[in-house]
Amino acid sequence: MKQHKIVFTGTPGAGKTTAIAALSDTPPVTTDVRNTDAALGKEFTTVGMDFGLCNLGDGCSVRLFGTPGQQRFEFMWRIVATDALGLVILIDNSRPDPLADLNVYLEAYKDMLPTMNCAVGVGRVQECPVPTLDDFADVLDARGLVLPVLPVDVRRREDVLMLVDTVLAQAEARE
C-alpha cells in the first residue's frame, strides 16, 4: 500500500481540524484543548497536531496531519511537515488581514516551499469576498511562488479532497 503524508497548516480557526475530520475515513486523532486566548474566539484549539487517514483506492492512502495555528506553536509547523509529500495552507478570509496571515506561513515554510507540493485554500470567501483569490495569487507571485489558490469550505469533503488532489497532482507532475 502506498501512503502519502499531507500537512494542513494555517491560521487559528481556518479549519484544519474540521478539514481533516471531513476527509478522514477513520475518526481523527486531535489534540484540542479548551482555549484560553479570548482573541481566537473559539472554545477549543489544537495544541499538538491532528491526524486522520483517507483511503484513495487503488492501494493508495493519505495520512493527514494538522498543525496548531497559533504562532507560539510555530516550532511544531516544520517538525510536522518533515517528510511530507505536500502542504495545504488554510486561510480564513474573515480574519482582519488574511494576506498577512498567508505571509506568516509562507515565511515559516520558505525553505521548504520551492520543492514542496503546496496548495492554498481560502475559506469564508462567500461571506468575505475581499481580499480576492487574485490578491492571494499576487502575494505568492511577489515571493516568486506559483501555487494554486482555491476557495474551500472545510466542512465539505469534496472541497478538502480537491485540495489534496491538487497536491497529489503536483507530485505526479514532478515525477
Image (cartoon, rainbow, N blue to C red):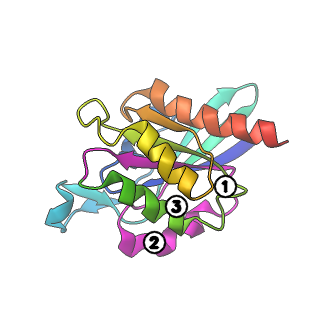
- Residue 81 at x, y percent in the picture: 60, 61
Mark 2: amino acid: Glu
The residues tagged by marks 3 and 1 sit, at their Cα atoms, a distance apart of: 16 Å
Residue hosting label 2: 74
Taking the image as shown, residue 121 lies to the left or right of residue 4, namely left
Task: Give me the disc on residue 106.
Answer: 3
Q: Is residue 157 above or below residue 16?
A: above
Residue hosting label 1: 84
- Decide: few, some or many residues near mark 3? Use Cα within 10 Å; few <14, some 14-19, many ≥20: some
Task: Give me the disc on residue 155.
Answer: none
Q: Is residue 8 visible?
A: no
Query: Residue 71's quadrant in the figure?
Result: bottom left
Instruction: Locate the N terminus and report the quarter of the image it occupies.
Output: top right
On whether residue 83 falls in the magenta region, the answer is yes
Mark 1: amino acid: Ala
Mark 3: amino acid: Leu
Instruction: Identify which residue, 66 or 57, lies in the foreground.
Output: 66
Instruction: Identify which residue, 13 or 93, lies in the foreground.
Output: 93
